[in-house]
Image (tube, grey):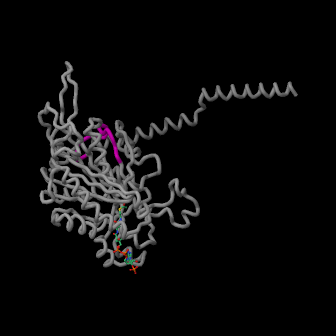
Amino acid sequence: MADGTKPPDRPVNNRPANNGPANNGPANNGPARQELQRGGEAVYRPRYAHIVGWGSYVPEKVITNHDLEQIVDTNDEWIRSRTGIAERHVAADPKETSVTLAVAAARKALEVADVPAGKIDLIVCATTTPEYAFPATACLIQDALGADNAGAFDLSAACSGFVYGLAMARGQILAGDAEYVLVIGTETLSRIVDWTDRGTCILFGDGAGAVLVAASEVPGGILAVDLGSDGSGGNTLILPAGGSALPTSLETVSSGMHYLKMDGKAVFRFATRVMAASTRKVLTRAGYTPEEVDLVVPHQANLRIIQNSVLNQLKIPEEKVFINLEKYGNTSTASIPIALCEAIAAGKLRTGHKVVFVGFGAGLTWAACAIDWRTPIDKAEADWWKNTRRQATYSAAAARSMWRRAVRWVYDVLPDPEAKGQDARRDREETGVQEGADEEG
Ligand code: ACO
């Protein structure tokens, strides 16, 4: 996209904007970063965290409610009326994983922002379906993108994870520790869902969404965040086996403990309560009233949860709440960024809009953020040269990754001269002891 995607630079304000914690400050008063100029004079530069790029990706394969009727005892009418979901995308190809979905979404976000992967300082990957317990999914994404200057870590806050990730990005940027942070939500929930359990398998879908958050001196961006948790409800939504409490065994697999388990009613009650409360909190922190909000992008779990919380309790009108769960089901950490991309494509978001993201999930967790959206939405003309260059950098990243693996392999197979010396010394010593022992004998 055009360079104009980034918030335009403004003249540097050389007075502190606000030295207190950003959360407590009024809207548009981000914290200042102090920089020592030549001669020792302190200059204060205001810093704000703006979303400047966005992208999403869902696998091709679609499973409709009618398809599910063939698998479990359910029907389209029940699923639609209780959840609002009509279909969901699933990663049917085993080669599609949380990493491949995330990389596809992240590349789009970088393209929109027109920022090369080499400029990313940090990658935060929120996921409930990581590629492995370790290494972090974020590190594998870093390698695939060729983001050689980025730190990377995974964030486990279930469906609230994407907003938690935005909070981390904002914190890094306002502290002056990062210029660009890539926040990703990616899921292959179809791999942890029990396809014989009609209470859960109808709800979830696969997909990924990503945003690039950038530092800027332009007031606005992510103004306020609210993060919450209540571990006492941890067992209401849980994947019991595979961790230290219940390591994987024949028994855990045969009893299906490696699948997601949920007390749907308890989660429903909790979600309707926290979605409204958390939204209220960030609105107050940002200095907005519910009437002023232009767009709410809620976690897309269940239409009735959104209706009972954001719409009914906060009295935010339906046209200001973006809902796309009918097509995707609950994609957990990916649901908000996927919905954001669709809201942008549908023309629901404009520069100057007051936006709220709000989610809830396993943990139990909840999170909301309020955004003063300043990034232009206009779509730039496709630039073949930039596209070619971008493709070339991704190919180079793949080649670099292969080279690094090859070098590690060579180190593994070649005899290590130092180790060889140590072996020889140990052999001599052992022989010496043996000889000594023989002599004594
Ligand atoms: N098809 C047909 N009937 C069903 C189905 C189905 N798929 N699932 C359950 N039923 C039946 C039940 O067996 C029950 O029958 P019974 O009355 O004879 O016992 C009846 O329908 C009602 O079941 P409930 O569980 O009471 O249905 P409810 O209205 O609570 O809806 C649902 C269930 C959709 C799961 C709802 O509770 C919900 O959405 N909860 C929140 C879940 C959620 O959002 N989870 C994601 C959290 S995000 C994360 O971190 C991953």
> Residue 421 lies in what quarter of the image?
top right
Q: Report ligand 1 position as a quadrant.
A: bottom left
Which part of the image, by quadrant, shows the C terminus? top right
Between 260 and 7, the one nearer to me in the picture: 260
* Residue pictured at 18% horizontal, 22% vertical: 41
Query: Residue 340 at x, y = what percent?
Result: 23, 56
Can residue 214 be seen from the camera position used here? yes
Query: Residue 297 at x, y = what percent?
Result: 23, 59
Between 122 and 370, the one nearer to me in the picture: 370
Classify 201 as above or below 409: below
Magenta range is 111-124
Q: On the rendered structure, is 230 left or right of 248? A: left
> Residue 7 lies in what quarter of the image?
top left
Query: Residue 21 at x, y = what percent?
Result: 24, 41
Residue found at the far right of this picture: 441
* Residue pictured at 26% horizontal, 57% vertical: 278
Is residue 114 covered in magenta? Answer: yes
